[in-house]
Amino acid sequence: MTSSNDKLKETTVSTEHIFTGKVISLQVDTVQLPDGTEGKREIVKHPGAVAVLAVHEGRLLLVDQYRQALGRCELEIPAGKLEHGEDPMEAARRELEEETGYRCSRLSLLHSFYTSPGFADELIHLYLAEDLKAGNASPDEDEFLEIIEATFAETQQYIAEGRISDAKTILAAYIWQQKMAGDHANKGA
Amino acid sequence: MTSSNDKLKETTVSTEHIFTGKVISLQVDTVQLPDGTEGKREIVKHPGAVAVLAVHEGRLLLVDQYRQALGRCELEIPAGKLEHGEDPMEAARRELEEETGYRCSRLSLLHSFYTSPGFADELIHLYLAEDLKAGNASPDEDEFLEIIEATFAETQQYIAEGRISDAKTILAAYIWQQKMAGDHANKGA
């Protein structure tokens, strides 16, 4: 999984813990750079998260929720933090059901990706959910959200308008589009 | 650009500034939730960044660099923070040239996206660079990196191996793939 380019390696000299919160913690690492000088690296620690690409009857499941960091609501695919020690696939199943009410019988990992490797270790595991069955949502007590089911054209429109504006959801839209093109090709079109 | 779903809106009650660093700052906001109760939101402030999808003679320009948050090297498309007041398109041109040496005569915005809207306001502007001309790289003094030019198959392999593992680069690979499929279709294939 890793590359090892020793010429580029930085070595941790010391770590200063700045903050430990409910979701993230912050530390400043002093590192020795490849040329022997020292530098500072501000690092946010995050427990990791899951996100789910779920399409039901040709519509992408999205949740509308307020994002304090953005100062506005945003449409995103269902997602949430990993609980301590939780298996990512189980977390994806849980988040999908809590946020949208949908249960799925098949989940497969599409990609695991870092959101901001320059300053954070947050890793998102993005799953494809298939064989969906509708049910009742039960979000966490400090989560207020609304479910939106969007056609591909509506999804493109939301991206163009900026109502969808986060990396994982835009990536999911490209993957959805590629899957549709693949399905189309497989049907001999 | 914004949606306004008042039922979901959170209102800032107070802000506690925790840390101001070279790259990021951290604050904890107390917010009033839609049901009238209060909650805490840990928010990382970031100046924003640019990233560049640049393909030269069928090869994607990538930079290999050590990421302290990940504890290893990673291959990413050329990218960097916005300087104070800098125009994103100029920043994209600057980062591409500093990191890879390539100059481009055409840049177009593909997407602007938030990397981690749950806890950070980092917004990345992703540009497509065209009409590339090779030159000499001149990275910042605390940036140590190596340029890699990868075919599409190599890019897919790097993603499979986890050497490419960040959201913006994986997204760029999907966009590249879609552009190639579009070019192929336009040529009447």
Image (tube, coloured by chain):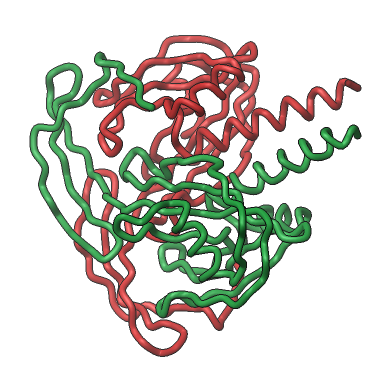
Chain colours: A red, B green
Quadrant holding the N terminus of chain B: top left
Name the residue at the front extreme: B105
- Relative placement, left or right, of A81 versus A111 is left
Q: Position of residue B91 (x, y in %)?
A: 44, 58
Residue A95, visible in the rendered structure: no
Is A80 placed above or below B24 here?
Answer: above
Which is nearer the eye, B168 or B71? B168
Look at the image and tell me whether residue A5 can be seen. Answer: yes
Residue B12 x %, y %: 14, 32
- Total marks shown come to 0
Indicate left or right for B130 with A37 as reference. Answer: right
Give the x, y percent position of residue A171: 57, 37
Instruction: Look at the image and tell me in which quarter the C terminus of chain B lies.
Output: top right
Q: Nearer the viewer, residue B3 or A114?
A: B3
Residue appearing at x 29%, y 28% in the figure: A72
- The residue shown at (22%, 65%) is A17
